[in-house]
Image (cartoon, rainbow, N blue to C red):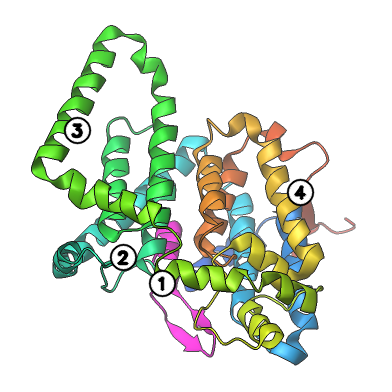
Amino acid sequence: MVFFALASFQNLSILSLSSVALKPVHAFSLLFLPLLLMNKEVRINKAVTVFTLFVLAVSLWNYAHFGFDGKLTYYVFGLFVVVIFQNCGKKLTYDDWLDAACGAAAFVMLIVILNDIKWKGSFITFFSQPQKSHPYFPTVMSHLNLESTWLGTFAFAFYKKGPWKWVYACLNMGIALLYGSRCGMIVGAMAILWLFIQDLPKLNTRRNRIILAVILVVGAVVAVRSGMYEAFIGRALRRFLSKGSEIGDTARLQLWQYAGLTIRSYPLGCGAGNGIKALVEASGVPTGEENWCNVYLQAFVEFGWVGGALYLYLVCRMFWNGRKELLSNPFLAALSSYCVVALFQFRGGETIAFFLLAFYLATRKPESAGKNDPDLVVRNPFLRKKGEV
């Protein structure tokens, strides 16, 4: 729980050297090294390993031209997180994993709410100025779009927590509306729909259907009469309908129009974190953006045609193999929401995305792993018995 919670506080750093930052989650992960070293065998997911090694190879190949970018360490650390979950959590049950995820998510949500209360003046200013896209204040999970989105991905894990799942899901959607985060609203809506599907069997009784109808009608009346609908939902809808006209949307579209040129200029890729540098070199157009706001596009730009195709293949294969679990495994569902909004934000290699992947790999059913995709097994040379090969 502590490990996952620390991963959420992306703004915390112990030490920064150029583009690399040592964060509390990195330091905490070292506590698992003795446990890994005590294992006779260390299991490593083959797909994550292959992709990470490919990213490392492309980045090293381009080191002389573009230099080193700290984003490369995100992928290496992500692989380490997967290895930790697979080997140090072997004795944990499915419910243990859920409890760990929910405990961390609840703690992070509490910290976020307390921080929002501290900066309540920013929200008052935001809602008094309809032309503003977002409130502006220091967040605890990177910037506010990411904060809202990540909180939404955590909501799926609460599906066994009775009414508390709706408390968390509603708080999360409320934060997305407060932040004016469209990606946060999309993930929040996906989480609510997924949680609702889990509760569909409960609607078999007439009593439960009546209770749900009453709650929805009363909630709608209160929202409209109190002005909350116009202040929150109406404003959000207008932002969705005006997509492409805001500064952030315009910046994305300007980047994307040079994607083809950049990929053709660097067909073998330019290395992790070097996508924007490659764009400027290829197009001669300066930009203040730090990433492509599209994980799939960024994969093709930074890792080339082969790397981009490999990334798409691995993502599609994961969902195809796990298709029977999409409505039962909350971590796969959370990953699906990440993959949807990855069309509009993120830069790839996100630590929390790797945590969600690690949770899924630790809780998926054996048949979802695929018959031809066994884990790599590395024997510990220090724990081999005498004469053992």
Q: Amino acid at mark 4?
A: Asp
| Label 1 neighbour load within 10 Å: few <14, some 14-19, many 20+ | few
Front residue of this view, candidates 76 and 286 = 286
Dot 3 or dot 1: first in sequence order is 3
Mark 1 vs mark 2, CA separation in Å: 9 Å
Q: Amino acid at mark 2?
A: Ser
| Label 2 neighbour load within 10 Å: few <14, some 14-19, many 20+ | some
Label 2 with label 3: CB-CB less than 8 Å: no
* Dot 4: element: loop
* In this view, 268 is above or below 230: below
| Label 3 neighbour load within 10 Å: few <14, some 14-19, many 20+ | some
| 88 sits left or right of 11 in the view | right
* In this view, 161 is above or below 292: above
Residue for badge 4: 375
Mark 1 vs mark 4, CA separation in Å: 45 Å
Dot 3 or dot 4: first in sequence order is 3
Residue for badge 1: 247
